[in-house]
Image: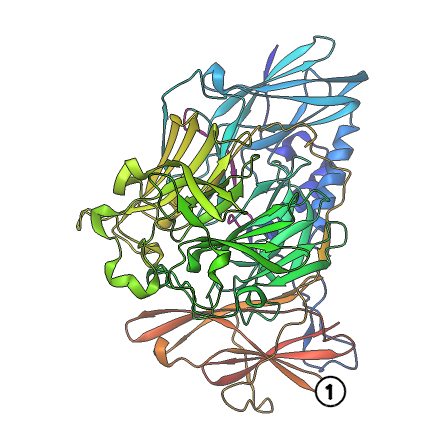
Amino acid sequence: MKEKFCTVWSKSLAAAAVLVLAAGLMICAARINAEAAETELTTEAVEDTEAAADTILLTETDIFAAQSAIDAALLQEAAAGYSFESPLVVLDPYGNSPLTAVAIFSTDEELGGTITVKGKSEENDISGTFDAATNHIVPIYGLYNGDTTEVVLTLDDGTSVTLEVTTEEIDTSAWDIEAEMLDSEAYDYSTMTLTMQSGGVLLIIDSAGDIRWYFNSLGTQGVHQLSNGHLMAPASYTISGTYYKSGLVEFDLSGKYYREYAIPGGEHHDFQELSNGNLLVASNSPDLSSIEDYIVEIDRETGEVVWELDMRDILGDTDDGASASILTDGAEDNDWLHNNSLWYDEENDLLLVSARHKDAIIAVHKTEKTLAWILGDPDGWESIDESYFFTPVGDDFEWFYAEHQVTMLDNGDIMLFDNGTAKVKYDDNDNRVTGNDVYSRAVIYRIDTEAMTVEQIFEYGKERGAEWYSDWISGVISLDGTQDALQVTAGSNLYSAEEDSYDYGPIYQLASGYTSTTHIDRLIDGELVFELTITGDTYRSQTYRSLVLSVYTEGATLDVTQTGVLLGSLGEKATVEPEADISLEDAETLPDGWTFSRDATKVTLSGSFTTKTSADDLADGYLVLKSADETKVYTLTQSTTESDGTTTVAVKGWVSPDGLEGSTWEIFLMLDGVTYASGYSVDF
């Protein structure tokens, strides 16, 4: 039996349910696709006598409330008695995963079954199972974009129904995706490739190069699949810079959020799930005075920081071993280490830190917080004893430079992506490798910590030359814990036809006039069996990393009974001394167009203004909080665009409740040297 179902939920629901579900969907989509509840604020005047009479008091937004309403509505529909032959099909129930749906139906007996989402060819079918029950909410993953996909549901008693599910088209023009199958017998068609695109999009792509899942509501730098089958990604809110996120979010392919963790100092680049369930996270110093050199362990159940490491305590904040990549990365002055990945070897209690700006993998005894060894070119290291470094042995050995994504194979070998930037140290930059001589590699090293020797036992990519060169991001993973099954992501190849060159680093990633290419290569027994190529003319075609996963992972069933929870804290935000005195008595009224909001972990604001002041002369922006007893000043983030003698300034800011409890605070801003009263206040 074949039925075609409406893709608009409200057409299939009773009027009362329509209101609940539609409202929930709209709120959820706004919450997820904007940045962390920035769209809601209280509009009634403050009656609290402690607050200024002419301010509006911000009330706390429950970021999981809308999701809970959707869960409740789904459960309500599951009890409505839709037949297996004519189920209710709901597209994108959480408003953030448009190539997914759920099928809702009831059976007289407790029955489980299977689901097959048909591919355009049989090898790209996606199959999974659902548990025995009488009321069913079965997730549908792998729908084609702007097309109709056949979905086959089969119960354990052999009864089957075929559905046709049509999705609305989403814009995927940023990516021209080509797939080349070189060895179909060696390729595992039960898995697909998840890519982490620059610009904040996650994609799942099948062996034909078709997009089968799309998600753009969280950060994309360092997504992993957890032991329970869920995914975890950086949160959407940026607390500093361009990619220092407020924490991490656990979610499933339907787009439901289960846990969000707020982390002092935020998250960047990478995390690892430990065997005890805790999260080891690449972070910044809690006051953000030092970046990409701090690591914390987060208790999975409470969100609390239970262990922390400042890499300055291991190496000292020195220029030792400085990489020439610093000169072309556009890095901030305090980005002395640039930790872009981590790996914990539990058996030996070793934490491996990938320090791009040192061209080195730093191994730390996690419990003792002491230096174990350093893998990398020893040139330029003066304050670290030479006994901590390895001596190369064997043929065809090369050191790595400006590396990414360190991992350890089951046999203890160290694997990483050698971006190959410059191939010299900072002090030897005049001899850096440039032009058509550039190349990147996936490389595996075998170390002997007793003899302190290192041998290179595998490399891939050097033979691909400059056309495969990837100066930044990128990575390599093992699919089975060995070097026999690898996936390599060369995610940032830039080409200028005008210069006929591929030799470009991160400072060019947002510039126009370049073709951006990602190569994602599946290697079996050292041979290339499959390659995805993603090209475009913007940074969105750049790929941070990729994963290989089964779309229907065992145990990762959508759970509409679990309520999402926000854990942890951003910690007390550091105050600053402003460049000039701030007078609040004569503050001007802030113009319309600014957004202020509050959730459990922070108050946020955003807006923009235009000024005649040049970007170079623009004064720092400040967030000012004033209570009856004191005044606190915090920095704002300002991004500028100059045109026709004017500067447009985009402004963002935040502050956590920590250290502000027990008072009501009026909110002021200082922009381009002028103080403004926001008209809002907050109490904690």
Q: Percent position (x, y) of residue 417?
A: 42, 44
Q: Percent position (x, y) of residue 186?
A: 45, 19
Residue 297 to residue 675: above or below: above
Comparing 466 with 102, the one in front is 466
In which quadrant will I find the C terminus?
bottom right
Q: Percent position (x, y) of residue 378?
A: 41, 58
Q: Residue furthest top?
A: 158
Query: Which residue does the image show at 54% across and 37% down from the upper left?
Result: 409
In which quadrant will I find the N terminus?
top right
Query: Which residue does the image show at 63% across and 55% down from the upper left?
Result: 365
Extent of the magenta region: 208-221
Residue 469 found in image quarter: top left
Q: For numbered disc 1, what is the local secondary structure?
A: loop
Q: Percent position (x, y) of residue 241?
A: 49, 64
Most frequent secondary structure within the magenta stretch:
loop
Asked if residue 246 can be seen in this view, the reply is yes
Residue 383 to residue 69: above or below: below
Asked if residue 613 can be seen in this view, the reply is no
Q: Is residue 562 left or right of residue 617?
A: right
Name the amino acid, label 1.
Ala
In reply to whether residue 215 is colored magenta, the answer given is yes
